[in-house]
Image (cartoon, rainbow, N blue to C red):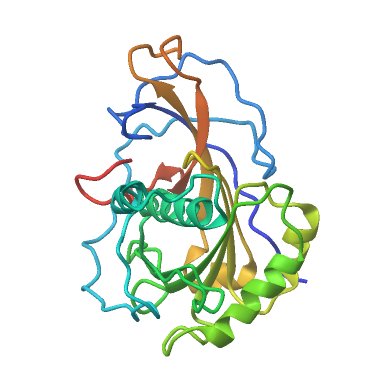
Amino acid sequence: MGPLHYPRTTLLAFRYSHNILLRSTGPFQPRLSSTSSSPSSLSSSATLPTTPPPTPDAAPPSTTFPSSSHPLKHHDLTSFLAHANAVNLSKTSTLYNGTLYEYTVLDSLSRFGFSLTRRGGRLDRGIDLLGHWALPSFILPHGGPPRVLVQCKALSRGPTPSLIRELEGAYNGAPAGWRNNEVLGVLVTTGPATKGVREAMACSRMPLVFFQIGVEGVVRQGWWNHGAEERGLKGVGVGMRYLVPEGDDMGDGDGPVMKEIVLNWKGEVLDLAPKGGKS
């Protein structure tokens, strides 16, 4: 059984707007005295970096992703919501909620350096999102940004090891170029990784990554196995930051204080968000 990544914690604080979730106005010194461990067994020790964090290289060359099996009338969260409203799609339907969660995941992972396109549809062969993870070149052992295939699961209960087996099987239905063990398989669920899920990841021969992302788009957990470390994540850590409502540093404004993970390298936070995008 290979090891899973057990990161230490870095604590930051950012402001967010209710209009555009997680829009940041920059880091500031948090006055909250402590933070509790998240379900991913993150350490509670916290430090703030005192030097500017490294920034990723320029975005990788544009890549033409394999197209979906059917024409899409939407390509991101905004266009899907407009389409759903135009066709009066029921907000209680499986189609609406499943598609909404997929685009929420796509939007959230873009802040962590993912460049993804949605496959969607009944013939997606178990792959919801496809693309690359634009990690900085000083992290990658060789080659360019790793290719990724993503499964999104909005669950009413915790994830089970069967989802890891399903993710492994998704490689067989992937398009050409996404079927080998250099491609990272990413499972995203609304619930935290269970012990069974973590053990299944550790036993897998495929390079696998797990994220917990809530329906509101907050990224709460990040795990990966030894195979993923060997393909670009070795030395990458996971920390925590506070997301504080705009208008009050201590969260006394209109909204709760939330915690979201950040990725770091040698104690410095990695700024992987698209330039000019949300952080």
Q: Foreground residue, 9 or 267?
A: 9
Q: How many marks?
A: 0
Quadrant assignment, res 138: bottom left
Residue at screen point 45% across, 9% down? 252
Tell me where residue 247 appears, x and y as whole percent: 33, 13
Relative to the observer, which residue lies in front, 226 or 80? 80
The quadrant of the rendering that contains the N terminus is bottom right
Vertical side of 167 occupied by 59: above or below: above
Residue 222, compared with residue 24, is above or below; it is below
Q: Residue at x 42, y 14 (%)?
A: 254
Most distant residue in the front direction:
88
The answer to whether any part of residue 266 appears in the image is no
Q: Quadrant of the C terminus?
A: top left
At 74% from the left and 60% from the top, the residue drawn is: 197
Indicate the position of residue 256 as horizontal and vertical percent values: 50, 20
Between 42 and 52, the residue placed more toward the observer is 42
Residue 163 occupies which quadrant of the picture? bottom right
Determine the residue positioned at 58% across, 79% down.
170
Image vertical order of residue 226 relative to residue 143, above or below: above
| Residue at the bottom extreme, as displayed | 176
Residue 147 visible in the current orientation: yes
The picture places residue 73, in percent across and down from the top left corner, at 30, 64
The answer to whether 125 is drawn above or below residue 221 in the figure is below
Percent position of residue 79, x then y: 28, 53
